[in-house]
Every structure is written in C-alpha cells, then in structure tokens.
Amino acid sequence: MLLTTPRDTAPPTKETLVDSVGGRTGRHTANDESWGGRDIMGFHRRFCLMGLAGMVVTGLGMLDGPMASGHEILETFIQHRTKIIVGATNIDIETELTFYKTPSILERQRMDVDHNGKITKAEIEDYVKSLGRLREEGVRLSVGGRAVKVAPLYEPELDLLGVDQVVESHHVLRLFYFGRTPKWLATGSVIKLEDTWWPEAEAILSIDAVGREGFQVEAEPNHDPYCPPGVPRVSRVRCLTTPAGAGQDEPLPGSVGSMHVGENMRGAGRWSILMLIAGATGILTLYLQCRHRELELP
C-alpha cells in the first residue's frame, strides 16, 4: 500500500487516504476496523489497566515498605507518645515511652540486679522507685511562655510486654503528671511540654491534645518527629477556645486527682494517600470511557 498526495489538491486530512492500487479514495473513521479503531481502544484499555496496577503497587509499597524497614531503623530509638489533656482545673500529662531493642536491653540489665538473666516483680518495683528523680526533673511545662509547676499524678507503669528476661526486646514505661490550669491560659496561648528522659538515646516524638470542660485545643504539627541525642524533646499544643472563669492559682495538692484521657489521632501521610486515590480515580474513569466506546463499535 503506497500513500500519495495529489499535487493539485489540498493536503489530505487524517481521514483521507489514496490507494494507488485500486485508485480508491475513502473516508475512514475510528469505527472502521481497517483504520484500527478496535486496536486503539484495546491499547487504551490495556494502558489504563497497567496504570491502575502501578498505582496499587505504589500504594502498597508506601504502606508496607516503611513498616517493614521501620523495625530495623527504630532498634536504637525510644518513642515518646504524649497526651496533654486541658481542663478548667488541671492540665494532665500522660507520656508513654516505648524502648526498642538497644535501649530496652540496657534498661533490662539495670533491672536485673542479681544478674541471673530474669527480671522479677521485686526488681521491677525497685527499678521504678529508682526513677524518682528522673520523674521529678525530667519534664517542664509552660503556658504562654510562663512556667507551670507539675507533679506526679500516678505511679509509673512498667510493661515488659510478656518478656521478663534480659534479651533484645521492647518494653513500655508510662509516666503521669498534672499541673494546675493557670488563669493566664487564653485563646491562642501555646502550651509547651519539654522532657529530658534518657537524653542519650535517639527519640521519635508524637503528641495528642484533648480539651474538656469547654476547652478546645490542638496539637501543633511536628514536621520532624526525629530528635537526636542530647536535644530536649519539645511538644506544643495551642489553645483554640477558652471558657470563661477557667484557670487556677492554687498550689498543687499533695494528693493525686483523676485524669481523663482522650484521643485525637492524626493520619500520617494522608496527602499521599489522597493523591493516590485521585490518580486511580482518573485512570479508572479513562478506562471506563474507552470500554464504553469499544462496546459501541459494530
């Protein structure tokens, strides 16, 4: 088949072909199989399916990849999960420290006083008591740039996660504090919490903020949760709404009070997930359009 263009006529369009063998000139459209309409539709359909498959693989990689490698990366870390609960009378603080392999075995060696490789209940109690000074001096609270005194709320909770031996494992230490809600806490005020627990270890930070009794608070986003050794761990909460008459100027009582814990979970990487969903939706729409046009072909 030879394609030619007559010199005395206008250049052909995409729909005009000249057959030098039969001298036939015709108009071909996407509905003509000789033009390749079905082949083009089939190509678009295969392209869409390949695109969808790629999006799925990418999404699974984003969700599963960090989880698979995270365990190895976090072996030397202590994860600091903090909740700050703001009420009319008190600001309650709960911190959960997760010790991964390297810091966990170091602390387990401290617990195992008799060095027999097994950690007993009595050794756990002695270890918790030894944390007294660390508990008292390891956390600082400020509101609007002014210091607020804090005191222990409950006794620490140590969870060996079912492994009571001196081996590479994980364990969790929970610490509880509270401070009086100051009268100068106003809308827009920033509540700052700084801790210096185990400053020699690398840390990963996360924070939740909960308001009660008319308070509305929000944790300020931490764009870099990693904290190197020797650097104080700082978390911030902003007060969005303050009820009238809230705040106390009284000294901290000697007895502990009750603490109400809430949740304000934030999804990590939500923008990446939304972008994946949008891309998959666009490809799926293109696929359906191509499929519909293909079914209309004779």
Image (spheres, helix red, strand yellow):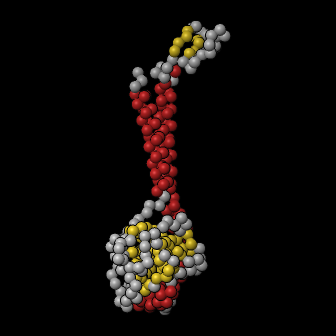
In the rendered image, the residue lying farthest to the right is 7
Relative to 282, does residue 66 appear above or below in the rendering?
A: below
Which quadrant would the C terminus be assigned to in this image? top left
The answer to whether residue 284 is visible is: yes
Relative to 187, does residue 8 appear above or below in the rendering?
A: above
Query: Is 240 positioned to the left or the right of 26 in the image?
Result: left
Measured as percent of width and height from the top left, residue 95 is found at 44, 77
Measured as percent of width and height from the top left, residue 103 is found at 53, 78
- Quadrant of res 230: bottom right
The answer to whether residue 124 is visible is: no
Query: Is 226 positioned to the left or the right of 81 in the image?
Result: right
The front one of 81 and 21 is 81
Measured as percent of width and height from the top left, residue 18 is found at 59, 12
Relative to 286, does residue 118 appear above or below in the rendering?
A: below
Measured as percent of width and height from the top left, residue 9 is found at 62, 10
Q: Residue at 38% x, 82% y: name it.
A: 248
Query: Total number of numbered labels?
Result: 0
The front one of 285 and 171 is 285
Q: Residue at 44% x, 43% y: name it.
A: 281
Q: Residue at 60% x, 16% y: name it.
A: 12
- Quadrant of res 5: top right
In the rendered image, the residue lying farthest to the front is 244
Q: Residue at 48% x, 38% y: name it.
A: 48
